[in-house]
Image (cartoon, rainbow, N blue to C red):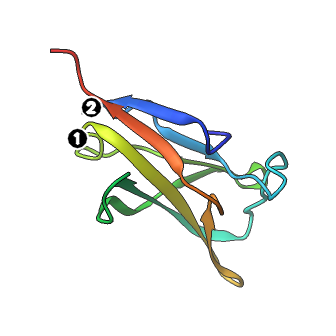
Amino acid sequence: MGNFNDVLEVKAGALEPIFFVYLLQADGVTPLNISGVQSAQFRMRTELATTLAVNNQPMQIVNASLGQLQYQWQPGDTSTPGRYLAEVQCNFLMNGPLIMPTHGYYRIYISPRLP
């Protein structure tokens, strides 16, 4: 998800496609170098709820200098169809947490499986 206006679609119960994100600087174009990140977590909730469906699950840093992270869905993460909002928290040793995107959310649509 290079742009937080994009919507990732996942079929209910599926573990792919994985959640892959490019963190960008404020200009929306330049990759955010996250080389100093100690850990990154993924959070997701439905559009209308405040309870998290996925809470602080570890993400894999794919390429820190290009701000690339991924989250591999776990069983149960995609079991309930609906529209979801997600964010990523990067934890820097010296500067503390950074929550991305800084404005808005990443959008995920979990579609029902065909009968």
- Quadrant in the picture for residue 34: bottom right
Amino acid type at circle 2 is: Ala
Q: Residue at x 29, y 65 (%)?
A: 51
Using residue 94 as the reference point, say whether residue 87 is left or right of it.
left
Check the image and report above or below for 10 versus 31: above
Label 2 vs 1, first from the N-terminus: 2
In the rendering, at what x and y percent does residue 2 appear? 67, 40
Q: Is residue 18 above or below residue 51?
A: above
> Residues at badges 2 and 1 in contact (C-beta under 8 Å)?
yes
Where disc 2 sits, the SS reads loop
Query: In x, y percent, where is residue 100?
Result: 62, 61
The residue closer to the viewer here, 83 or 41, is 83
Q: Tell me the residue at 49%/44% (across/down).
A: 107
Q: Circle 2 sits on which residue?
A: 12
Q: Quadrant of residue 89?
A: bottom right
Q: Residue at x 39, y 47 (%)?
A: 84
Instruction: Please tell me whether residue 53 is drawn above or below residue 75 in the rendered image.
Output: below
- 33 vs 77, left or right, is right
State the residue in front, 55 or 46.
46
Q: Residue at x 84, y 53 (%)?
A: 27
In the picture as drawn, the residue positioned furthest to the top comes out as 115
Label 2 packing within 10 angstroms: few (<14), some (14-19), many (20+): some
Quarter containing the N terminus = top right
Query: Which mark identifies residue 80?
Result: 1
**Which quadrant is the C terminus positioned in?**
top left
